[in-house]
Amino acid sequence: MENVLILDGSKVASEIKDQLQKKVEVLTEKGIVPCLATILVGDDPSSATYVKMKGNACKRIGMISKRIDLPKETTTEELLNVIHELNDDENIHGILLQHPVPAQIDERAAFEAISIEKDVDGVTSLGFGQTALGFGEYPSCTPAAIIEIIDYYNLPIEGKHAVVIGRSPILGKPVSMMLLNRNATVTTCHSRTQNLPQIVKQADIIVAAVGKANFVQGDWVKEGAVILDAGYNEGNVGDVDYDACFAKASAITPVPGGVGPVTISMLLKQTVAAAEKISVKTQL
Ligand code: NAP
C-alpha cells in the first residue's frame, strides 16, 4: 500500500505523559502524590528491566515508585502478606506484580489478592470480568494501549473484523473483549486454531499477541489491514514480519516504538486515576 500510516506509539505515549504530569502536579499540591508499588520476585533480568522502566517512567512525571524486591525463594504466603500490606497502605494507589513469578508461587492467588481499587494492571478476575462486561476501570495495560493507539489515530473499530492472535489473560483475551465491546466482529486465534493464515486474511484489524518473532507473514494480510503488533521478542523484534506486512497494511505499529511505550503510559494513567479517586473521596 502507498502512504502506510505508521502508528507512532512513542508519540502517543509522550502526549499522554505530558497530560499526566499536569494531573500529578495538581494532585501533589493537594498532598496526594500518585504512587505505584511494583513487586519483583526473583532475579529474572528481563523482568528486572521492565520493573525499572516502569519505575523510571513514574518518576519522570513526578509520581512515586515504590519498588519491592523479593527473593526467588519467596512463598505464596509471604507474597500475599506483602500484597495485603500494600492494599492497606493508603499512600499506595496502584500495585503491579511483575509476571512471571517463580514456579513455587501461586500467581493467580497473588493476583487475586490485589484489591480492585489498586488493580491498575487489570490482573484480578474481577478486573477482567468488569473489562469483559464493558465497565472495567483499569483494563490490562497492553490491551488498553492497543485501543488507545487505534483511537488516537481515529481508526474505525465498529463493524470491522478484528482477528486477535493469542488468548492470554493479560493480552489476547481482554483485547478481544474490548474490541467486541467497541462493536468489532472478533475472532480470537490460538495455538490450536486451524487455517490461521486464511482467518488472518479476513481481518480488517490484526492484533498480534503470540510471543513469536516475525510470526505473522505478509501473505496472510489483506490489503489495507490495520496491524497492531504487541509482540516483544529477543532483539526488539515484534510478532509481525514488519517489512512484508508493511507492504500490505494501511496502518501498522513498529517494534520498538509501538504498543510498548503506550503500555507503560496506560499503567501510569490508571495509577493517576486511582489516586484521583482518593482525592475525590477525601474531599467529601
Ligand atoms: P503468552 O501468554 O505466551 O500467550 C501467547 C498466545 O499465543 C497464547 O494464547 C498461545 O495460544 C498463542 N500462540 C502460541 N503459538 C501460536 C501459534 N502457532 N498460532 C496461534 N497462536 C499461538 O504471551 P503474552 O503474555 O500474551 O504475550 C504475547 C506477546 O506480547 C509476547 O511477545 C510478549 O512479549 C508481548 N507483550 C508485550 C507487552 C507490551 O507492553 N508491549 C506486554 C505484554 C506482552 P495457546 O493459548 O493455545 O497456548
Image (tube, rainbow, N blue to C red):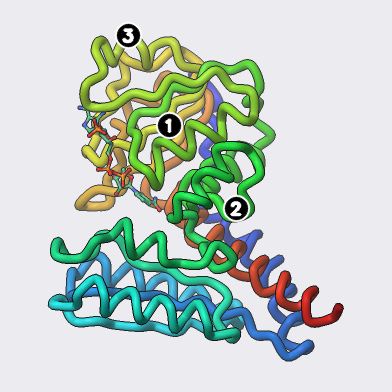
Please report whichever mark, 2 or 1, sits nearer to the chain's N-terminal start: 2
Q: Quadrant of residue 283?
A: bottom right
Q: Residue at x 34, y 74 (%)?
A: 80
Label 2 beta carbon less than 8 Å to ligand 1: no
Could you say where residue 202 lies in the image, as x and y percent from the top left?
A: 44, 10
Label 1 beta carbon less than 8 Å to ligand 1: no
Using the image, determine if residue 102 lies above or below residue 10: below
Q: Are marks 1 and 3 in contact (CB under 8 Å)?
A: no
Q: Residue at x 44, y 83 (%)?
A: 85
The local secondary structure at tag 1 comes to strand
Query: Between 276 and 152, which is closer to the camera in this rendering?
Result: 276
Label 3 beta carbon less than 8 Å to ligand 1: no
Could you say where residue 110 lies in the image, as x and y percent from the top left?
A: 34, 65
Q: Which residue is mark 3?
A: 198
Could you say where residue 254 lies in the image, as x and y percent from the top left?
A: 42, 42
Q: Residues within 10 Å of mark 1 (few under 14, many from 20)?
A: many
Per the rendering, the mark at residue 207 is 1
